[in-house]
């Protein structure tokens, strides 16, 4: 018998039988479990850096009361533009450059302020800040003729330096500054005492004491240089009261049970 090439099984067919011969068509296909990724967990640093203020930001805010106190949260954004035509009138001889970003005054009662200072657009965008002038200080004035002043200042990382002046003719002044405070501190009182918290003292360089005024530099003293200082500046004046300055997150020990504000601002 002559066997023709067509009668021989091809190598390709044999290979195909070997390739698929190990698969049993009666067995069910293997189970499939899709891989589901867990949602990302927010880091603690991101949550902790989130501002906790509740008020809507404003600018050039001025409050003045004769017989009632001023108390509240004040969020200042120096980049907000408000037409001068709807702002309170300035004092005689003052210009728009003299207008305070925040001005709180109570003639016969107290001032209690929780202050937040936001950054300016130029400081938030490094590229837009190239070649631009340094942001001007955010200015704050706190005045009480016959009451006390208690204030704490929060600043975001990109906030401009601030200039805070506080005057209480017949009351005490308690101020809490942020850890980022870096600048001059001036304390004046004629018939009271002045004190800094222990942690603030560690970062303070005393510059002078002339009559009733003491001046300190908080932070790296080498940054002061020979030119006029344009960084943070705090000036406190209590004619017949005491002055106390601490860091805003600083917890001070007390020997007696005190209220929330006393624990917040120290002695």
Image (cartoon, rainbow, N blue to C red):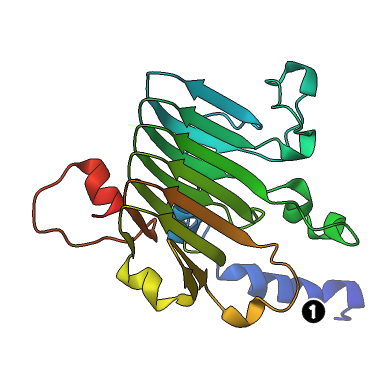
Q: How many marks?
A: 1
Q: Quadrant of residue 146?
A: top left
- Disc 1 residue crowd, few under 14, some 14–19, many 20+, Cα 10 Å: few
**Residue 198 at what x, y percent from top left?**
31, 71
Mark 1, residue position: 11
* Residue at 26 percent of width and 54 percent of height: 266
Q: Is 171 rendered above or below residue 89? A: below
Q: Is residue 54 left or right of residue 109?
A: right
| Horizontal relation, residue 171 to residue 164: left or right | left
Which quadrant would the C terminus be assigned to in this image? bottom left
Q: Residue furthest front?
A: 211
| Residue at x-position 42% and y-position 30% | 72
Q: Secondary structure at mark 1?
A: helix
Location of residue 114 (image quadrant) = top left
In this view, the residue in front, 211 or 71, is: 211
- Residue 93 seen in render: yes
Q: Is residue 159 left or right of residue 253?
A: right
233 versus 215 height, above or below: above
Q: Whole-percent x and y of residue 52? A: 45, 42
Picture coordinates of residue 160, whole percent (x, y)? 67, 54
**Left or right placement of residue 215 versus residue 69 in this view:** right
């Amino acid at each position: 018998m002559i066997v023709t090439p067509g009668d021989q099984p091809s190598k390709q067919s044999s290979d195909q039988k070997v390739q698929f011969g190990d698969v049993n068509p009666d067995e069910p296909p293997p189970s499939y479990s899709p891989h589901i990724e867990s949602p990302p967990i927010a880091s603690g640093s991101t949550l902790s850096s989130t501002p906790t203020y509740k008020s809507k930001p404003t600018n050039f805010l001025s409050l003045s009361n004769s017989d009632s106190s001023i108390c509240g949260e004040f969020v200042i954004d120096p980049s907000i533009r408000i037409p001068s035509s709807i702002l309170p009138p300035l004092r005689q001889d003052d210009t728009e450059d003299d207008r305070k970003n925040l001005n709180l005054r109570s003639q016969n009662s107290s001032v209690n302020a929780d202050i937040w200072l936001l950054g300016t657009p130029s400081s938030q965008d490094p590229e837009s800040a190239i070649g631009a002038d340094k942001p001007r200080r955010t200015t704050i004035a706190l005045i009480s003729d016959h009451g006390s002043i208690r204030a704490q200042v929060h600043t975001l990382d990109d906030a401009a330096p601030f200039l805070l002046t506080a005057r209480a003719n017949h009351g005490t002044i308690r101020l809490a500054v942020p850890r980022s405070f870096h600048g001059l501190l001036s304390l004046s009182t004629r018939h009271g005492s002045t004190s800094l918290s222990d942690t603030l003292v560690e970062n303070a360089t005393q510059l002078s004491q002339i009559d009733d005024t003491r001046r300190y530099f908080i932070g790296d003293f080498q940054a002061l240089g020979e030119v006029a200082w344009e960084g943070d500046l705090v000036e406190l004046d209590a004619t017949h009261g005491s002055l106390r300055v601490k860091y805003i997150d600083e917890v001070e020990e007390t020997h007696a049970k005190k209220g929330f504000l006393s624990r917040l601002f120290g002695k």
